[in-house]
């Protein structure tokens, strides 16, 4: 028995109990107080479907404290939400490998390209994109890029017919 226990890395008493069948198998998680928390959690998830278990825990604990009850651990809320399929879907399970299959062509060597732009969605669903400037300037040797470097006279003044002031 000692050789088997040493090989498995467990104590002899533990192994002896298992061989005799005295140990009970682990049961599933269950607490009687979870039944009282479930309706509160379901109401919060219905009201705020984008909240994860940690934010639901914070809102739930705020409500419990105002009612004079003890707060709940976030791991317990996670287990309850998992058991009742209330957790958010994971966003990034596997990211595809992005490959660059195009070819970058520049007019000459030692040329740095800079661009600036942003995009946001309005409340009515319209997407506003802003990308006014695409400029190029030669990079000085052994220098750190700077916004004070000289630029062509018309840099930053490009307007397109679809551009509008925000």
Image (cartoon, rainbow, N blue to C red):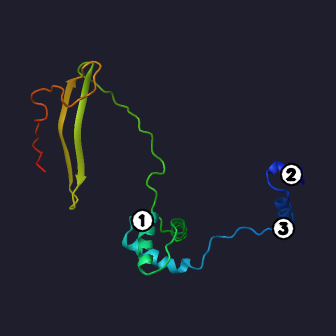
Q: Is residue 69 above or below residue 108?
A: below
For label 1, the SS is: helix
Which class describes the residues within 10 Å of circle 3: few (<14), some (14-19), or many (20+)?
few
**Residue drawn at x 18%, y 29% as measured from the top left:** 148
**Mark closest to the chain's N terminus, 2 or 3:** 2
Viewer-nearest of discs 1 and 3: 1
Q: Is residue 161 above or below residue 123?
A: above
Q: Is residue 79 above or below residue 67?
A: above
Which residue position holds label 1? 55
Query: Disc 1 and disc 3: Cα gap in Å?
Result: 44 Å
Q: Is residue 83 left or right of residue 127?
A: right
For label 3, the SS is: loop
Q: Are marks 2 and 1 in contact (CB under 8 Å)?
A: no
Which class describes the residues within 10 Å of circle 2: few (<14), some (14-19), or many (20+)?
few
Query: Disc 2 and disc 3: Cα gap in Å?
Result: 17 Å
Q: Is residue 24 left or right of residue 84?
A: right
Checking the image for residue 110, the label placed there is none
Q: Is residue 133 above or below residue 52?
A: above
Q: Are marks 1 and 3 in contact (CB under 8 Å)?
A: no
Quadrant location of residue 44? bottom left
Quadrant location of residue 48? bottom left
Which residue position holds label 3? 21
Residue furthest out toward the right: 1
> Who is closer to the viewer here, 141 or 101?
141
Q: What x and y, as percent, mark residue 113?
A: 24, 29
Which residue position holds label 2? 4
**Mark closest to the chain's N terminus, 2 or 1:** 2
For label 2, the SS is: helix
Q: What x and y, as percent, mark residue 93?
A: 48, 51
**Residue drawn at x 53%, y 67% as measured from the top left:** 82
**Residue drawn at x 20%, y 25% as measured from the top left:** 137
Q: Are marks 2 and 3 in contact (CB under 8 Å)?
A: no
């Amino acid at each position: 028995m000692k050789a088997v226990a040493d090989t498995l890395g467990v104590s002899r008493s533990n192994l002896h109990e298992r061989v005799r069948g005295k140990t009970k198998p682990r049961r599933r998680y269950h607490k009687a107080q979870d039944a009282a928390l479930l309706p509160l959690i379901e109401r919060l998830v219905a009201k705020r479907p984008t909240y994860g278990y940690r934010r639901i825990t914070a809102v739930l604990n705020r409500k419990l404290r105002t009612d004079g009850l003890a707060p709940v651990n976030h791991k317990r809320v996670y287990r309850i939400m998992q058991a009742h399929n209330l957790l958010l879907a994971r966003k990034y399970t596997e990211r595809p490998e992005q490959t660059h299959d195009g070819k970058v062509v520049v007019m000459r060597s030692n040329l740095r390209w800079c661009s600036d732009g942003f995009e946001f969605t309005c409340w009515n669903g319209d997407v506003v994109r802003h990308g006014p400037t695409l400029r190029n300037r030669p990079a000085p040797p052994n220098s750190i890029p700077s916004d004070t470097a000289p630029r062509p006279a018309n840099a930053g003044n490009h307007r397109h017919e679809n551009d509008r002031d925000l």
